[in-house]
Image (cartoon, coloured by chain):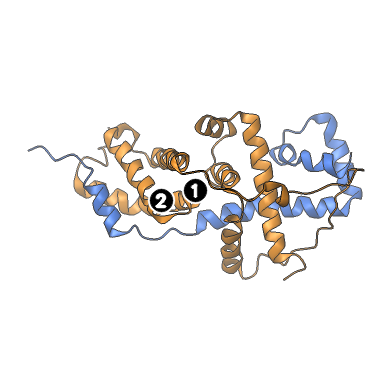
Chain colours: A blue, B orange
């Protein structure tokens, strides 16, 4: 397995659905290729950090103009 | 049956104030423009109000995603940075052309690091960032994303992989060498 092959299998590797006959080759390549280990680690970190950054960021109060605009969408209450 | 949160103005306003910030954050991630983000949230509530059975917060999330995708499709196509410059290159023998320098410890000064990640995400071309946000942040399946964007599931998987690699590259531009 080359670095190019290892890179192409990253999504399946992380999702746990890599073809069984490729798992040993993938692991063997990473055991001997420090550069691919570094890339795999950074690829993992990018996913985790991206998720954390967006889930934890930018959640501020809703602007009052937007609250009023949404409230105006509500049907009138029938009496 | 639980009363609809849209049954009266007070319940609706409470829902807007509790769910609105999260929905607005999703819309901002997808659209990167404040006016469009607020429009998407308004459209999501409009859809939910028109169909009170979809009032669960998860449905509001889906509706804001749908509204955001509609707004993105309506935008004029802007020229995107080439993704090819942001994904790994390989030598004829299949080895990486680049040596990947270590990153600093991202567990320290976490808030600053996450701010840098958000900035780096904006350096990922929009059509790729959209798939990454929908999958890795909002948790949509590749099949759901494919249906929403009119792509094949395989095209979504390829776009997601490239988006993740592009984000890694943008982060490496900041951090490689332990900066």
Residue at x 83% of width, y 55% of height: B98
The reply to the same-chain question for discs 1 and 2 is yes
User: Residue B74, image x and y in percent?
Assistant: 44, 40
Query: Which chain hosts label 1?
Result: B
Q: Quarter-wise, where is residue B68 in the image?
A: top left
Residue displayed at 68% across by 65% down? B174
Would you say the residues marked 1 and 2 are in contact, meaning their CB atoms lie under 8 Å apart? yes
- Residue A1, by quadrant, is top right
Q: Which mark is residue B37?
A: 2
- Whichever of labels 1 and 2 marks the residue nearer the N terminus, that label is 1
Q: Secondary structure at mark 2?
A: helix
**Residue B60: image location, x then y, percent:** 38, 41
Question: In front: B95, or B74?
Answer: B74
Q: Identify which residue is drawn at 58% across, 69% down.
A: B112
Secondary structure category for the residue under label 1: helix
Crowding near the residue tagged with mark 1, few <14, some 14–19, many ≥20 C-alpha atoms within 10 Å: many
Q: Is the C terminus of chain B in the top left, top right, bottom left or bottom right quadrant?
A: bottom right
Q: Residue B30 bears which disc, if any?
A: 1
Q: Chain of mark 2?
A: B
């Amino acid at each position: 397995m080359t670095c190019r092959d290892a890179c192409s299998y990253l999504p399946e590797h992380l999702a746990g659905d890599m073809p069984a006959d490729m798992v040993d080759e993938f692991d063997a390549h990473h055991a001997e290729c420090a550069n691919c280990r570094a890339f795999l680690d950074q690829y993992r970190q990018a996913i985790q950090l991206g998720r954390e950054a967006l889930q934890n960021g930018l959640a501020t109060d809703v602007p009052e103009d937007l609250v009023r605009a949404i409230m105006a969408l509500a049907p009138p209450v029938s009496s | 049956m639980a009363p609809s949160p849209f049954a009266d103005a007070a319940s609706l306003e409470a829902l807007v104030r509790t769910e609105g910030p999260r929905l607005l954050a999703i819309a901002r991630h997808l659209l990167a423009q404040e006016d469009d983000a607020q429009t998407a949230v308004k459209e999501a509530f409009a859809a939910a109000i028109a169909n009170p059975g979809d009032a669960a917060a998860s449905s509001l999330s889906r509706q804001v995603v749908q509204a955001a995708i509609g707004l993105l499709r309506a935008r004029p196509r802007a020229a995107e940075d080439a993704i090819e410059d942001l994904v790994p290159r390989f030598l004829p023998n299949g080895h990486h052309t680049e040596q990947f320098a270590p990153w600093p410890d991202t567990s320290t000064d976490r808030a600053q690091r996450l701010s840098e990640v958000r900035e780096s995400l904006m350096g990922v071309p929009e059509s790729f960032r959209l798939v990454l946000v929908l999958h890795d942040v909002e948790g949509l399946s590749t099949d759901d994303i494919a249906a929403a964007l009119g792509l094949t599931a395989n095209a979504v998987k390829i776009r997601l992989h490239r988006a993740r690699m592009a984000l890694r590259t943008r982060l490496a531009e900041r951090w490689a060498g332990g900066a």
